[in-house]
Image: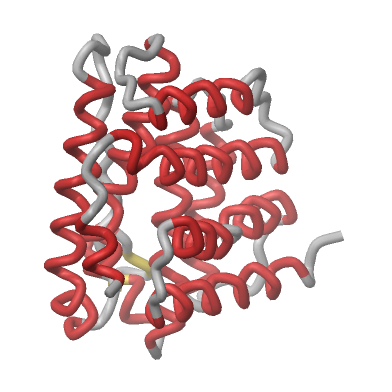
């Protein structure tokens, strides 16, 4: 049933709430870290209203935000699945390919008139090593792999979409977060620096992204429910160390 509902998403208006939920996630993470967000909230409202009206003739800053958000979601699924067991990757191959296609088709309508828009590339397991071994070799169990994959990839997703949306993300913080995150979730580091832990706690609020997408698009999905539980559990665990 979930796939059938997603098959209906074709037009910019269909993806207005999809964009809005992702952009609000970017805003909340950035604001939570004290990054300067300016008028991003109001720009999200204007872009969402335009999408609902079927308009693609947006000012460059709004068009870039929409295109980046949708392109990042399109590019996210395949590399994420490569971090997971083969049965999971194969099982989601077709839905991921379809979602990638639809998201890119709509994103292209907003990117056509932009002078330049980078295309995101997310890390595959072969890109991430710890002590000379793939990071995935250091974790056992489905949930542990899922959390490791998300901890790496949602950082990359956020940095790409935030920067394309005009939000400055400190490069040194990103570098430290990636380095510490991989070592931490691979069991090679006992603690995260306080600011890195806060960053990851905010990034793990993507459990709310999963829930809100499921609610808005009426996706009665056991898989979405499972994703949400894993992400929420890790967010709560990280929260116990804050403050």
Relative to 225, 36 lies left or right: right
- When asked about the image quadrant of residue 109, the answer is top left
Q: How many marks?
A: 0
* Residue lying at the far front of the rendered structure: 53
Provide residue 229's location: percent of width, then percent of height. Answer: 55, 78
Relative to 13, 180 lies left or right: right
Q: Is residue 146 above or below residue 5?
A: below
Q: Is residue 182 above or below residue 203?
A: below
Provide residue 10's location: percent of width, then percent of height. Answer: 21, 43
Q: Residue at x 32, y 39 (%)?
A: 70
Q: Is residue 44 above or below residue 148?
A: above
* Residue lying at the far right of the rendered structure: 243
Q: Residue at x 65, y 62 (%)?
A: 192
Q: Quadrant of the C terminus?
A: bottom right
Provide residue 211's location: percent of width, then percent of height. Answer: 53, 65
197 vs 233, nearest the viewer = 233
Q: Quadrant of the N terminus?
A: bottom left
71 vs 11, nearest the viewer = 11
* Residue lying at the far bottom of the rendered structure: 141
Q: Residue at x 33, y 48 (%)?
A: 73
Q: Is residue 211 above or below residue 44?
A: below
Relative to 70, 33 lies left or right: right
- When asked about the image quadrant of residue 65, the answer is top left
Q: Residue at x 52, y 78 (%)?
A: 230
100 vs 195, nearest the viewer = 100
């Amino acid at each position: 049933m979930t796939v059938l509902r997603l098959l209906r998403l074709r037009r910019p208006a269909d993806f207005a709430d999809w964009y809005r939920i992702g952009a609000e996630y970017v805003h909340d993470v950035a604001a939570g870290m004290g990054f300067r967000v300016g008028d991003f909230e109001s720009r999200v409202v204007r872009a969402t209203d335009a999408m609902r009206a079927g308009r693609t003739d947006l000012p460059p800053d709004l068009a870039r935000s929409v295109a980046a958000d949708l392109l990042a979601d399109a590019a996210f699924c395949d590399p994420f699945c490569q971090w997971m067991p083969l049965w999971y990757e194969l099982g989601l191959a077709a839905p991921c390919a379809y979602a990638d296609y639809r998201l890119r088709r709509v994103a292209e309508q907003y990117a056509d008139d932009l002078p330049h828009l980078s295309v995101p590339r997310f890390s595959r397991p072969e890109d991430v090593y710890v002590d000379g071994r793939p990071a995935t070799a250091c974790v056992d169990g489905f949930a542990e792999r899922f959390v490791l994959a998300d901890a790496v990839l949602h950082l990359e997703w956020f940095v790409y979409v935030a920067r394309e949306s005009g939000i400055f993300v400190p490069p040194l913080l990103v570098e430290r977060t990636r380095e510490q995150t991989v070592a931490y979730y691979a069991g090679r580091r006992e603690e995260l620096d306080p600011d890195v832990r806060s960053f990851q706690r905010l990034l793990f609020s993507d459990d709310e992204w999963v829930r809100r997408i499921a609610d808005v698009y009426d996706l009665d999905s056991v898989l979405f429910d499972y994703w949400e539980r894993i992400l929420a559990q890790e967010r709560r665990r990280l929260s116990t160390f804050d403050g």
